[in-house]
């Protein structure tokens, strides 16, 4: 055991004991035959085994985490810096394939300098086989969770360290493609400080979070509760939906103003008051993050699902919803499809970013790709117009199999002020344009563009409305899971 700053540096066996339930550990590892290697390398391997207390740089097997079966692959850095040679690569691939055959999720914890230089190109190429086995696991709809420890670099980070459905790293961990010592030796200058650090990668949307090892059991428990557990019995009571044909008894402009007001329920309220066991996912996992969209694995009133919601509390004139937010939304769609989970989208946006950066970042293309992805999904999908539904940014998350709206929610091709400028040359006619364009939830219900409208009450708080919306969404998810006659 060592330390990294103020963080404990865990050995493979310590981490296994920490995360797995007591008495559940079962090794899948076969003895490693080193007889084919040169004598000096054999001596090096024997010395490494004595130092590390393991026969290779990885340990694999199965156990349970809070009662749920899981397969594991754990690096041991003390064995030749956790490097991956042919035997280690074959051990990892074999474990992943056994997990696939047995229908087990896989938890991997890395700590490695990358490919083992003593074994050269053949070891390097074996990283491909690990990736192939992992894609077979993912194709089977099985979860792959990754925990990056200090340090994780090179071929390990560029293969099995970067293919997780959920990826976290320990605080302060060095995580990077090229080790900083190698970079400095090759380039004659140090690598920029603070780049290859877990916290920076989380901020940039490369990994989902920074999580101490001590919190891994809780994280794995919450993730697998969504990813593998059956739905739970509901606890929330849905409100009777608004009757079709109901007419609005006030100007729709009042609804638009209400959805723009402080205190209006947003996607965070849905998760706070109607969800359990939420695991937030941050960024695209490809180096982009836009907090105007929130994505999460969660259970809405007991129903496991992936949620992607436009976060009204994070959208301002200074921080509008950019194309990166829709790339995050597409990550959520792909995750739901691959893992066989229902997808819930929450629409609440004053509109997508209008700027040079948004144009050059393919805003229009991302809207199109979100729509295309959503309409071709085969898992159950539910969208909710919770508040503002403005422009292409709203349309990107709209076309689910079931479309709901809160009673004061609305949908329009432009902000009503923008529509007023186009038609009248001034923003002064925005209320008239909103009425003429029939943007309100009741108009959408009458036209068949939404399937149901969730009533809002005069005394609704953010909490009570959030619970009513979640209750209806969960009811629709339960219905979608029932076999049809």
Image (cartoon, rainbow, N blue to C red):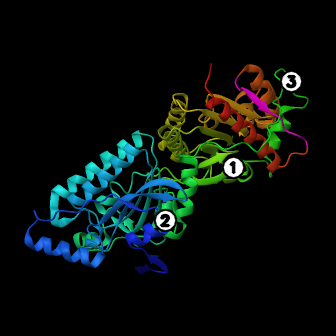
Q: Quadrant of the N terminus?
A: bottom left
The question of residue 454 being in magenta is answered with yes
- Identify the residue under disc 2: 19
Which label sits on residue 246? 3
| Disc 1 from disc 3: Cα separation | 30 Å
Residue at the spot x=44%, y=69% of the render? 15
Decide: is 328 above or below 151: above
Q: Is residue 326 above or below residue 48?
A: above
Q: Are marks 1 and 3 in contact (CB under 8 Å)?
A: no
User: Which of pointers 3 and 2 indicates the residue nearer the eye?
Assistant: 2
Q: In the picture, residue 75 is in which quadrant?
A: bottom left
Residue 220 image point, x, y percent:
52, 58
Looking at the rendering, the stretch of residues picked out in magenta corresponds to 449-458
Q: Which mark is residue 328?
A: none
**Where residue 337 appears, x then y in whole percent?**
50, 37
Q: Residue at x 52, y 31 (%)?
A: 377
Splitting the image into 4 quarters, where does residue 430 fall? top right
User: How far across and down, in percent of the image, does residue 465 sit?
Assistant: 80, 44
In the displayed structure image, the side of residue 445 where residue 154 appears, left or right = left
Rendered position, 135 above or below 157? above
- Decide which of 20, 217 is in the foreground and name it: 20
Where disc 2 sits, the SS reads helix
Cα–Cα gap, marks 1 and 2: 25 Å
Dot placed on the residue nearer the N-terminal end, 1 or 2: 2
């Amino acid at each position: 055991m060592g330390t990294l700053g103020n963080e404990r540096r865990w050995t493979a066996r310590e981490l296994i004991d920490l995360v797995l339930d007591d008495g559940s550990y079962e090794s899948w590892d076969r003895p490693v035959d080193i007889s084919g290697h040169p004598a000096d390398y054999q001596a090096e391997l024997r010395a490494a085994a004595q130092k590390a207390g393991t026969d290779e740089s990885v340990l694999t097997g199965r156990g349970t985490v809070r009662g749920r079966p899981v397969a594991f692959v754990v690096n041991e850095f003390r064995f030749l810096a956790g490097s991956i040679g042919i035997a280690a690569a074959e051990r990892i691939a074999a474990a992943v394939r056994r997990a696939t055959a047995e229908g087990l999720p896989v938890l991997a914890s890395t700590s490695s300098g990358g490919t083992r230089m003593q074994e050269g190109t053949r070891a390097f190429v074996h990283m491909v086989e690990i990736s192939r086995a992992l894609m077979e696991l993912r194709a089977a709809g099985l979860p792959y969770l990754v925990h990056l420890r200090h340090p994780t670099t090179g071929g390990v980070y560029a293969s099995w360290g970067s293919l997780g459905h959920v990826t976290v790293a320990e605080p302060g961990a060095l995580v990077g493609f090229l080790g900083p010592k190698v970079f400095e030796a090759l380039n004659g200058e140090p690598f920029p400080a603070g780049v290859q650090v877990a916290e920076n990668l989380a901020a940039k949307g490369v990994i989902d979070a920074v999580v101490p090892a001590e919190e891994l059991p809780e994280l794995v428990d919450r993730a697998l509760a969504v990813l593998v557990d059956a739905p739970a019995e509901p606890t929330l009571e849905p409100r009777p939906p608004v009757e079709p044909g109901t007419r609005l008894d006030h100007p729709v402009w009042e609804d638009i103003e209400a959805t723009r007001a402080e205190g209006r329920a947003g996607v965070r309220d849905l998760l706070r008051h109607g969800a359990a066991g939420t695991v937030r996912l941050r960024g695209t996992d490809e180096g982009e993050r836009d907090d105007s969209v929130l994505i999460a694995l969660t259970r809405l009133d007991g129903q496991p699902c992936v949620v992607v919601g436009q976060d009204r509390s994070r959208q301002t004139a200074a921080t509008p919803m950019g194309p990166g937010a829709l790339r995050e939304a597409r990550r959520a769609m792909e995750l739901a499809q691959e893992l066989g989970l229902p997808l819930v989208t929450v629409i609440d946006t004053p509109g997508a970013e209008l700027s040079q950066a948004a144009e050059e970042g393919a805003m229009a293309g991302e809207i199109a790709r979100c729509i295309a992805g959503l309409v071709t999904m085969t898992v159950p999908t539910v969208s909710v117009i919770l508040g503002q539904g403005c422009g292409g940014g709203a349309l990107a998350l709209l076309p689910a199999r079931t479309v709901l709206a809160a009673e004061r929610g609305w949908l329009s091709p432009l902000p009503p002020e923008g529509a007023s400028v186009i038609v009248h040359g001034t923003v002064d006619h925005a209320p008239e344009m909103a009425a003429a364009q029939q943007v309100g939830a009741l108009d959408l219900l009458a036209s068949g563009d939404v399937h149901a409208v969730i009533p809002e009450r005069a005394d609704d708080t953010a909490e009570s409305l959030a619970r009513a919306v979640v209750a209806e969404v969960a009811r629709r998810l339960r219905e979608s899971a029932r076999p049809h006659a």
